[in-house]
Amino acid sequence: MIQIAIPGHKDLHLEHLVLDYNGTLAVDGQLIGGVAERLTTLAEQVQIHVLTADTFGQVNSAVADIPCRVSVLPPGQQAEGKLAYVQRLGVEQTACVGNGRNDRLMLAAAALGIAVVQAEGAAVQTVTAADVIAPDIRAALDLLTNPLRLVATLRS
């Protein structure tokens, strides 16, 4: 579990980290450098979940060496599917990271929602649903391994 006390904000007790794949962990289906190592480190504290439509058909091979659960969601109702997944885990103990319009509902519901803006960009609705915006996935994951960065951003 990752526990972070944020003055003037809610304290976080995170047991799950839910991540979108394409546009968040990967660009054009290829895992972004430095992500595997960060996720492996975080997996010592939280359960890692990767949600995807698997547009490029590469998610399982790309994350094969990362301790995580992969869920390929069917086409249509992606946003609702991701939200339902996070609700099953428990929104109050889940952090979510994403960039696409279909990530907006899970980011809004999660105890901590992080939007990333990378090569694909980020949907405006997702950015406004997030608690924090990170310039890339490495910075987003580093917020969880270096929680004082998150405290500095979210405290009152």
Image (cartoon, rainbow, N blue to C red):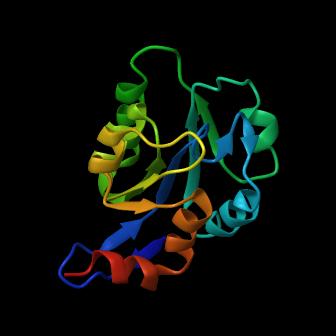
Q: Nearer the viewer, residue 28 or 1?
A: 28
The quarter holding residue 5 reads bottom left
Q: Nearer the viewer, residue 65 or 53?
A: 53
Q: Is residue 4 left or right of residue 51?
A: left
Q: Residue at x 58, y 53 (%)?
A: 48
**Does 155 sit above or below residue 118?**
below
Q: Residue at x 63, y 37 (%)?
A: 70
Q: Is residue 108 left or right of residue 145?
A: left
The quarter holding residue 41 reads bottom right
Across and down, in percent, residue 28 comes to 70, 34
Q: Nearer the viewer, residue 49 or 32?
A: 32
Across and down, in percent, residue 136 comes to 56, 58
Q: Quadrant of the C terminus?
A: bottom left
Q: Residue at x 40, y 76 (%)?
A: 150
On the question of residue 88 being in view, the answer is no
Q: Is residue 33 left or right of residue 80?
A: right
**Does 26 sit above or below residue 74?**
below
Q: Residue at x 75, y 64 (%)?
A: 37
**Does 92 sit above or below residue 6?**
above
Number of numbered discs present? 0
On the question of residue 95 being in view, the answer is yes
Across and down, in percent, residue 71 comes to 59, 32
Across and down, in percent, residue 61 comes to 82, 36
The quarter holding residue 64 reads top right
